[in-house]
Image (spheres, helix red, strand yellow):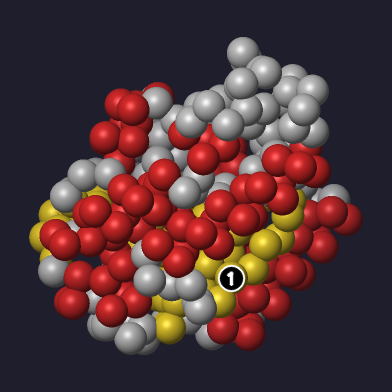
């Protein structure tokens, strides 16, 4: 496996499409790079794949529609905190933790929607979730937008960010020898803005929803692991 350390300014793409399986993955996975891209004047569009509505399934006061609406608002606030308040964004609103299976009409519709995003924006760089990240929504989102780019007839560069790989990944989830180049990007002055953007996702980080003891919550350890001075990406080797 090769390894490269880059300054954010070395990313020469002019049009960057970010694929976030859930609202908060954009900030956790690549928020620092996005802050720099905003200041470099690059065009950025964020595609939020799922509605994020599965994190508190047993809350009587936060049914799924309310939670999904809140998570979209949190995503907008996070982008603003990264200097991307005017950046384009698409909400595909697929079901969190229940994305459609390939070969079904719902998957065909999702692929059509994803392809429309790619065709309209025409990125020269895709920031994708890691293809074997342990969460199925991350894997499915990688596959969905990889297929969308192929269907759109585009071959943008790709960088893949991992959210859960280092925390709960199995050995086979990690990059294989000769498969990927590790690209580390030192985010420097973007770190404070990245951490601020992560806190915009209040339903996932705080006590906003206190009535579901089974709920998912980002731990301090996970945030510390992902919101450090270096963001790591994987780039496929030829």
User: Residue 218, relative to residue 211: is it above or below?
Assistant: below
**Location of residue 189 in the rendering, given as x and y in whole percent from the top left corner:** 16, 62
Mark 1: secondary structure: strand
Residue under the point 45% across and 39% down = 133
Q: Is residue 204 left or right of residue 190?
A: right
| Residue occupying image coordinates x 69% and y 33% | 54
Question: Given the current orientation, which residue lies at the most extreme right position?
Answer: 105
Residue shown at 35% from the left, 51% from the top: 196
Which quadrant would residue 203 be assigned to in this image? top right
106 vs 114, left or right, is right
Q: Nearer the viewer, residue 77 or 166?
A: 77
Q: Which residue is mark 1?
A: 89
* Residue 132 placement (x, y as % from top left): 46, 41
Residue found at the far top of this picture: 213
Please state the total of marks drawn on the protein image. 1
Measured along the vertical axis of the image, is residue 128 above or below residue 38? above
Q: Quadrant of the C terminus?
A: bottom left
Q: Residue at x 18, y 51 (%)?
A: 230
Instruction: Give how far across and how far down residue 188 sits, in percent.
Output: 14, 60
Residue 184 picture location, percent across and down: 18, 55
**Residue 179 in view in this figure:** no
Left or right: residue 223 versus residue 93 is left
Q: Is residue 231 visible?
A: yes
Give left or right: position of 14 versus 120: left
Disc 1 packing (10 Å; few <14; some 14–19; many ≥20): some
């Amino acid at each position: 496996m090769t390894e490269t350390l880059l300054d954010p300014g070395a990313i020469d793409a002019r049009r960057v499409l970010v694929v976030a399986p859930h609202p908060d993955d954009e900030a956790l996975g690549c928020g620092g790079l996005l802050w720099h891209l905003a200041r470099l004047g690059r065009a950025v569009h964020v595609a939020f794949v799922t509605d994020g509505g599965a994190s508190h399934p047993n809350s009587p006061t936060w049914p799924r529609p309310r939670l999904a609406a809140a998570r979209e608002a949190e995503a907008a606030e996070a982008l603003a905190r990264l200097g991307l308040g005017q950046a384009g964004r698409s909400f595909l609103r697929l079901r969190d933790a229940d994305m459609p299976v390939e070969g079904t009409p719902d998957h065909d519709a999702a692929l059509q929607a994803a392809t429309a995003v790619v065709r309209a924006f025409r990125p020269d760089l895709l920031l994708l979730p890691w293809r074997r990240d342990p969460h199925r929504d991350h894997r499915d989102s990688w596959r969905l937008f990889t297929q969308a780019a192929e269907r759109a007839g585009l071959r943008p560069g790709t960088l893949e960010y991992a959210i859960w790989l280092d925390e709960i990944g199995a050995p086979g989830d990690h990059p294989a020898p000769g498969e990927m180049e590790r690209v580390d990007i030192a985010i420097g002055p973007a770190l404070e803005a990245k951490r601020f953007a992560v806190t915009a996702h209040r339903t996932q980080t705080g006590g906003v929803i206190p009535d579901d003891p089974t709920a998912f919550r980002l731990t301090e350890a996970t945030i510390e692991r992902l919101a450090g001075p270096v963001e790591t990406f994987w780039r496929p080797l030829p």
